[in-house]
Image (tube, rainbow, N blue to C red):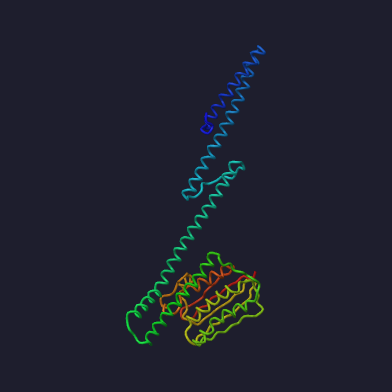
Amino acid sequence: MNAGRLSINRACVLGAAFSGIISIAFIIAVFLLTKNPAVVWLGLLFATLVFACVAAFVAFLRRKLVLFSGGLCRTIDNMLDGAAPPPQSYEEENLFNKINYRLTRLYEVLRESRESIAKERADLQELISDISHQVKTPISNLKMINATLLEQPMPEEKQREFLQASSGQLEKLDFLMQAMIKTSRLETGVISLDRKIQPLYDTLAAALGGILLNAERKHIHVSVDCPEDIILAHDRKWTGEALFNILDNAVKYTPADGDIQVSVQSWEFYVKIDITDSGKGIAESRQGIIFKRFYREEEVHDIEGIGIGLYLAREIITMQGGYIRVASRMGHGSSFSVFLPRG
């Protein structure tokens, strides 16, 4: 008989038959040697008890195997279907539960991996949709400018105006691509933040240096209160990028002759950086979505920007264990508070 085709039931039947034949042969041999019927009856009773014990043990073992194989099949079926794993009992510590427990852990790992892949796929799809939406306008403008220059004769001065407009659209595309590269590298972990114990003053000064020229053009007064002795663990380059994005937004949405105040306070567990402007403010209903990628309010579409600065700032601060809080009222400006952990 092929051992590979031998089922558990057949194995039990064959084992019982073999045991019965051995027991009968043993009893006959004892009777022939002793000629004593009492010994035969005792041997028969003993064989019956042994057979009953073995049968009970085999039945118990078979039941355990059936339950284990059933649970194993259900777990594997759920793994294939993506359903929740069946409930497990950990009251006993035996071989079957150990195997089932590890299989369930494997299932949980695979399910988490599947969910992670699904989330990454959804994020990638959203990112592609956002990029296609953002590049649509500058590309359409470039096509229109190029067609106008090719098809219509115009004086040199007019051509220069069209070329300057084309250059502005190209700069917008380049800015968009650079912002998307920074965002994707941070999200995918290609760039890891290098937190070092260093002064915050130099980081904030570098961020302020990027907005002072635009602030001067709008005659915006910028005041800074940052003690030079505040030291904390942070990535200077990326933290400066986050602070610059918040400051740049403050300059963009603050009218001419306005004010921007920057203050830094050292707390026990956090360092708080407040950036307050005298702009138009943000409605309370919108304060929860201003950090969304590519979000821009309808009434500010005439102001340069693509709506990725605050999103990138939040990602950078969050990756360092901090958070950003916003407080604003319409017509009374906005205040962005950046909290960075000291440790």
Of residues 240 and 331, the one drawn nearer to the viewer in this rendering: 240
Residue 283 in the figure: left or right of residue 319 = left
Residue 201 in the figure: left or right of residue 286 = right
Residue at 37% of width from left, 78% of height from top? 146
Measuring from the top left, give residue 319's x and y in whole percent: 57, 67
Measuring from the top left, give residue 55's x and y in whole percent: 57, 28
Of residues 66 and 153, the one drawn nearer to the viewer in this rendering: 153
Which part of the image, by quadrant, shows the C terminus?
A: bottom right
Measuring from the top left, give residue 34's x and y in whole percent: 67, 13
Measuring from the top left, give residue 220's x and y in whole percent: 51, 86
Residue at the farthest left position: 152
Residue at 52% of width from left, 81% of height from top? 277
Residue at 44% of width from left, 66% of height from top? 128
Of residues 132 and 334, the one drawn nearer to the viewer in this rendering: 132
Of residues 49 and 195, the one drawn nearer to the viewer in this rendering: 195
Q: How many marks?
A: 0
